[in-house]
Image: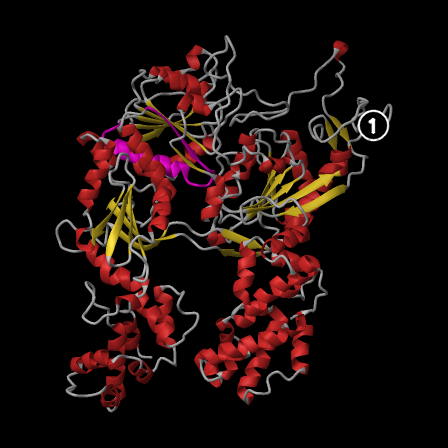
Amino acid sequence: MTTTRRQIFENLTLARGRELASLFELDGLSSLSKDALVEALSRERSLEPEKVLCALSRDELTSICEALGLDTSGREKQLLIDRLLKHDAGTRERAAIYAISQEPASGTSPKGMNKKALTEADIRTKFITPALDKDKHGSWDVMTQLLEEHYFTKGRVIVRGQTVHRGEAKKADFILFYKPNIPIAVIEAKDNNHAVGDGMQQALDYAETLDLPFAYSSNGDAFLEHDRTPGANPVEREIRLDQFPNPDELWQRFSASKGYSKQQESITTYDYYDDGSGKQPRYYQVNAINRTVDAIARGEDRILLVMATGTGKTYTAFQIIWRLWKSGAKKRILFLVDRNILADQTKTNDFKPFGQAMTKITNRTVDKSYEIYLSLYQAVTGTEEASNIYKQFSPDFFDLIIVDECHRGSAAADAAWRQVLEYFASATQIGLTATPKETKDVSNIEYFGEPIYTYSLRQGITDGFLAPYKVVRIGLDKDLDGWRPEAGKLDKYGFEIEDREYNERDMDRNLVLDKRTELVAAKITEFLKATNRYAKTIVFCENIDHAERMRQALVNANPDLAAANSKYVMRITGDNNEGKAQLDNFIDPESTYPVIATTSQLMSTGVDAQTCHLIVLDKRINSMTEFKQIIGRGTRINEDYNKLFFTIMDFKRATALFADPGFDGDPVQIYEPREGDPVVPPDEPTGAGEEEPTDGIVVDPPPPVGPGGDPEPPKRYYVDDVEVSVAIERVQYLDADGRLITESLTDYTRKTVHKSFATLDDFLTRWNSADQKNALIKELAAQGIFLDELAAQVGADYDAFDLICHVAYNQPPLTRQERADGVKKRDVFGKYGDKARAVLEALLKKYADRGIQTMESMEILNVDPLRDFGTPIEIVQLFGGKAAYRAAIHHLENALYATAA
C-alpha cells in the first residue's frame, strides 16, 4: 500500500470503515478504533480495487466514472466496471478509494430509498442528526452540544481467575448539552422497523442515571418526547423531525420548572474549570456537582454528598467551589480535613488551579488576605479557648465550608469540627463522605439532612469505575477455638497469665501469640509469591504494637527482598516519622517501594493507593464506617499498572460485614433521642484498643506501676511457645449481582447452572444448537460461573463443556486431548481438500491446547501455524467462503461433542 492510499483511508469515518470491513468479511476489524481500523485496512491484501468495485451499485459506479471524467451514458453495471478496470492500476485504485471514502448524504431519504432497510446507524446519520443541526441559528452545535454513541460507564470488571475483562458499558445514542457538562436530554434511536417510542424505556433509564430532564426516542419518522420536569403536562408527546426543540427552548422549560431567577440561572450555568487537557468529569461527578450548585443557588445551606471511596470526591468538591467562586455566589471558602496528608494532596493536586488565591492554615496562624483556605480541624481548634484560632475570623468571614470525610465526628455535639460549623453557622456547609455515620449515637443526616446525591461502592463496581474484589477468609485455630493457659503459665517477660479463655477478641489486644503473627505473615507471603511479590499490600493491625510486630514477621518471612531493599516492608503509623515519610512513595504507582505497609488507623482513610492489590485484615472491625473506609483502599482502578481488581485476606471475620444490610446501602437515620436527650446526637466513643487517628505522635501507654514501684500485671501478655495453625481457608468471589458467594465453588456452580438448565438434556440441547459455543460460555460467565477457578479445582485439561457436565450433572469428564483424539480416529475431515483438511487439523490441535473459545475465534487464523496457510481471507476461501468455513467449524464441534449427545 502506498502512503497516498493510507492517507485516503484515513478519510473514512468509523462507521464507513466498519461497513467496508463487514463487506469483505474482515472479521475482527469491526470492533477496532478508528486508527487501528485504518491501519488494518491499509495492510489488508484482500482489499483489492477490483473487489471493491464489484461490490458497488451501478449508481455508485456511475458517480465514480463521472468523477474521473469517463463516459457513462447507457452503460450497464458490468460495462462500467470493465471500463474502470481497463485503466491503469493507479486509476483503478483511485476509483476504489474514491468509492469507499464517500459519505452517505444526510437529510431526508433519497427518492426510492427503502427506509425499512436502513440500519440504526443510518437512521441516526440521515434523519436524527440533521433534525438537530437543521439550520445555523438556534440549532444544536454538533461539536460542543452533542455526543453521539457516548459510553458513560466503563463496563464492569469481570474477574475469572487471573483473567480480567470488562463487561458491556452503557452507551447513549445521543446526549444533548445546554453547555459543556450541563446535559439536558438523551435520545435513543431505533431502526425504522420499530415504532417511534420503542426506545423510550431505555431513554428513561439513561435519563434517570444521567439526571436529565428530557428523554426522546426516534425511529427516523418522528420523536417521542418525555418531559421529566415537575408538573409537566403532557408528560409525553410526539413531535415532527423538523420541530425538535433547540437548546434555548429546552433550557427555558427546565429553568421555568426550577423557578430560577436570573441570578440563580447565572450560577447554575457557570462554566466548569477546564485545564485544556481534555479531562472530563464522569457522569456521577457531573450529577453531584450540578445538584449541589443547583441546591446552593436555590438557597439550601446544609448539603450532604455521599460518594464511594475512589470516585473523586475531592475533584468533585473542587469543581463545586470553582463554579460558586467564579460566579460570585461564594467569596471565601474553607475546606476542612482531618489528616495532614489529605490537605497536602488536595493543595498540590485537585485544588492547584486556585493558585495564589489559596492558602493552607499552618502553625496556628491566620492570614485573612486569601479566598480559599485549607485546614486540618486540629490546626484551628483545641481544648483551651486560646487554641480555637478559628475565632480570629469573624463568624460571617466564610460563606462556604466543605467538610471532607465528615463521618469522622463532624456531626457530634462535642466534636471539634462541630464547634467550627456552629461558629460559622451563616455559611453554606457541605459534608463529603463515602460512609455516612448513622448509629444511635452519631448521625450525619441529623446535621446535614438527607444526601443530595449518593454514588455507592456497589454502583461504582457495576459501572466499572471501581475495582471488584475477591475475599480469602482464613480462620486460625486459636482464634476460633480459643486458648486457655495452664495454671501458673508465664508469658515470655515473666508475667503470670490470667487464667481464663482467650479468643479472637483478645488476640493482639490482651494476648499476643508470636506464632500467630508468624503464621499470618507466612500466609501473606504465600499469597504474594503465588501472584506478585511486588504487589502493593496494606496490612491492618489492631494497634501500633501489633503493626510493628507484623512488620518484623513479614521481614523474616521475606528475607531475600527485605535484604535487597530495607523499605520492602514498612510500618506506617502515626507515631513513626520514618514510616510516614514513605507514605507518598507507597501511594505513587511509579515507586516500587514500600511494597508492604503495616498500619493500624493512619491508612484507613483518605490514602489514594491506586495500585493496592492486597488488603489484609488482622484487626477486629465492628464499625461499618471504618470497614467501608478500609475496603476503599483497594477499590481504585489503574489500568496503566494492571490494577483492575483486588483481594481481601481476612483473618478476623471482618468481611462478615459484607452480609450486613447496612453495607453499601443507602444511609438510614436511626437516632432515637430519649426524654431529656439532646436533639443532636453525641459522638461515637472510640472502641477499646483502637488507635485514635492523628498526625501527631501516638504511642502505647507505659505499663502501670503498682505500690513499691513494681509493675502491675500487664494488660497484654506476650506468648512465644504456643503453636497456631490454619483451621479454615476459603476463597470467596463476587457473583453476578455483586454478592459474595458463601458456599463451595462447585455447589455454587451446580446451583447456578441448574437455574438455567434443569437437566443434562436441557444443557446438551442448548449446547448442540448454539452456533457458537463461546456465546453460551460467555452467557454462563455473566451468570457468575467461574470456569477458570473450576478448572483449577477439577482439572486444567478439561474444557468448559466437560467442567459443566461433570460439576453440574456428575458426568465423567474427557480431557480436551481425549476429545481431539476421538475426532482423529473417526476421519471426520475426509470430505475436505488437502489444504482445508490441514487447517482443520491445526484448529483441532489448538482446541486440545487451549479450548473451544480459541478455535471459534477468527483471530486464531492470524497465529502460527494457521497463518502459514495464508491470510484469514485466503484460508476462508479454501472452504468456499465464510459461510462454508463456519459450517466446517460447526461440523468439527459436533464431532468433538458427539459422544455426549
- Residue 800 seen from this side: no
From the viewer's side, name the closer residue of 232 and 821: 232
Image quarter where the N terminus lies is bottom left
Is 172 contained in the magenta span?
no
From the viewer's side, name the closer residue of 788 and 385: 788
Q: As drawn, is 49 to the left or to the right of 761?
A: left
Is 308 contained in the magenta span?
yes
Q: Name the residue under label 1.
A: 485
Location of residue 258 in the rendering, given as x and y in whole percent from the top left corner = 25, 32
Q: Which residue is drawn at 39% across and 19% down?
A: 421
From the viewer's side, name the closer residue of 406 and 262: 262
What is the magenta range?
A: 301-330
Q: Quadrant of residue 828?
A: bottom right
Three-letter code, disc 1: Pro
Q: Which residue is drawn at 45% across and 47% down?
A: 463
Q: In which quarter of the image is residue 119?
A: bottom left
Location of residue 685 in the rendering, given as x and y in whole percent from the top left corner = 56, 20
Crowding near the residue tagged with mark 1, few <14, some 14–19, many ≥20 C-alpha atoms within 10 Å: some
